[in-house]
Image: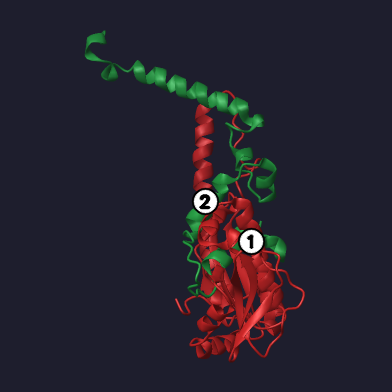
Chain colours: A red, B green
Amino acid sequence: MSESAVYMYALARSDGWQPTSLRGVDDQPVRTVSTGPLSCIVSTVSLDQFGEQALQRNLEDLAWLERTARQHDAIVHACASRTTVMPLRMATICADDDSVRSRLTGMADQVVETLAQLEGRDEWGVKVFAGESPSADSRPRPPRTSGTAYLQQLRDQRARIGDSVEAAARDAEVIFAALRDRAVLAHRHRPQDGRLTGDARTMVLNAAFLVDREEAAKFHDAVAELSGSRPAGSVVLTGPWPPYSFTTGVDR
Amino acid sequence: MSELSTGHDGATLADVLERVLDKGLVIAGDIRVNLLDIELLTIKIRLLVASVDKAREMGIDWWEHDPSLSSGERDLAEENRALRSRIAALQSSRPQEAPADEQVR
């Protein structure tokens, strides 16, 4: 390997679990760098791929970005299933282990406190979409002779979509409030743009909930029940995620 | 019409990118990289998707709903073109919009 650096995935307590068989984003073993009460889960990376210029170029490459993002997530995920972690943003890279240690020193108290809050809890994602996508079966099928009728159908369809987005947005508020009461913490992300999701339906809620692992089944039941009783929105549940959405804002 | 999907199947690339690029603890490393705004970045990603199979795999199939691109709806596109040319013809025959030197009435 040419000149190398240290890629950081997540923080954990140094008395916790140690990774043994994971491979990192650059196919090097995942290991920990520790100082005091904290460990950082890391792997060595080549500057050929993760140096400043290479990284800037690689982040523009869809295949590279997707592969690396999914690997980053998989490693954080694997660690989170064994110990309590604070995930770091993708592409946090230090020159060497000493540089990682110097980052950990000084933030220990705050991180240990946050790790205690995250212990035994997972993040669950709840997205709500408005109605059905305007797919082939629901699109107007105009009689070929009438442009006027076609335009009227289009207007009617747009009105219906507008109504269904409003109804779904109202349902989403009820769903968010009910689930927030069943979670330790709740966070609303910006709804994802349809151009990003590739989903023609309008996303009206994109929320993350921090839920006690013991309460996960009840949380799922609540999601299912709300999904059934709030028919204007289609509910998508994702998870369990490492607590990505509940570690932002620290040391910014 | 309400549907409930669960599990990892529901996690899209957008979900993963949103979390690993936009969430998580921020520590300034030694390698400084300008992570673009997540939204701009992912829109760009969508535009970069060149392979149809890859796009379908990622759940992108909007062109299948676009009348001008989908073969099953070509006649609809033709009807739209016919309507547009009819509108253009009607507009050009309206006296108040005709140039003064060509006005016949």
Asked if residue A119 is positioned above or below residue A136 in the image, the reply reads below
Contact? badges 2 and 1 (CB < 8 Å): no
Say whether residue A155 is visible: yes
Q: Which mark is residue A207?
A: none
Point out residue B101 in the picture as x, y percentages from the top left corner.
22, 10
Observer-nearest of B55 and A213? B55
Asked if residue A9 is positioned above or below residue B103 in the image, the reply reads below
**CA gap, disc 2 to disc 1?**
18 Å
Q: Which mark is residue A68?
A: 1
Horizontal relation, residue A178 to residue A238: left or right: left
Point out residue A152 in the picture as x, y percentages from the top left corner.
50, 35
Q: How many marks?
A: 2
Please tell me whether mark 2 or mark 1 is closer to you in this view: 1
- Residue at 64% x, 70% y is A44
Observer-nearest of A75 and B79? A75
Q: Point out the image quarter for the N terminus of chain A.
A: bottom right
Which amino acid is tagged 1? Answer: Thr
Horizontal relation, residue A60 to residue A18: left or right: left
Which amino acid is tagged 2? Answer: Ile
Asked if residue B27 is positioned above or below residue A114 in the image, the reply reads above
Farthest residue to the left: give it: B100
Circle 2 is placed at which residue position?
B43
Point out residue A215 in the picture as x, y percentages from the top left corner.
68, 82
Tag 2 subunit: B
Farthest residue to the right: give it: A21
Label 2 crowd (10 A; few <14 / some 14-19 / many >=20) = some
- Residue at 48% x, 66% y is B32
Point out residue B82 in the picture as x, y percentages from the top left corner.
51, 21
Tag 1 subunit: A
